[in-house]
């Protein structure tokens, strides 16, 4: 959830409702992008996002790492 206020110049991102380990569906919801774009982002080595593999096909990213990648911390 992204919140803004009249006194803030940058929106704040509250990910406390999301788990510590974000799966592609979480990244998709936060960024409001398509499923295809989410998987392209998470598979791209050029994005700089530290994605971990879970098993053969699962992908995940740490919530704090994701926030830093977005530039919020």
Image (tube, rainbow, N blue to C red):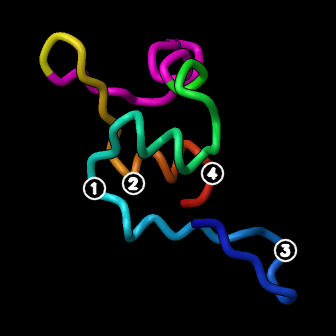
Q: Label 4, label 2: how many angstroms apart (C-alpha)? A: 11 Å
Foreground mark, 3 or 1, reads 1
> Which of the labelled discs sits on residue 71, or is there none?
4
Which quadrant of the view contains residue 31? top right
Q: What is the magenta range? A: 39-54
**Are dots 4 and 3 in contact, CB under 8 Å?**
no
- Residue appearing at x 57%, y 66% in the figure: 1
Disc on the earlier residue, 4 or 2: 2
Q: Is residue 17 left or right of residue 46?
A: left
Tag 1 residue = 20
> Which of the labelled discs sits on residue 64, or is there none?
2
Q: Label 3, label 1: how many angstroms apart (C-alpha)? A: 27 Å
Tag 3 residue = 9
Q: Label 1, label 4: how many angstroms apart (C-alpha)? A: 17 Å
Q: Is residue 11 left or right of residue 73?
A: right
> Which of the labelled discs sits on residue 60, or is there none?
none
Disc on the earlier residue, 2 or 1: 1
């Amino acid at each position: 959830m992204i919140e803004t206020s009249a006194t803030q110049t940058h929106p704040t991102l509250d990910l406390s409702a999301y788990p510590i380990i974000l799966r592609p569906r979480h990244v998709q919801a936060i960024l409001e992008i398509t499923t295809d774009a989410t998987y392209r982002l998470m598979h791209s080595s050029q994005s700089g996002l530290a994605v971990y593999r879970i098993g053969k096909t699962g992908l995940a990213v740490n919530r704090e790492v994701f926030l830093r990648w977005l530039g919020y911390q």
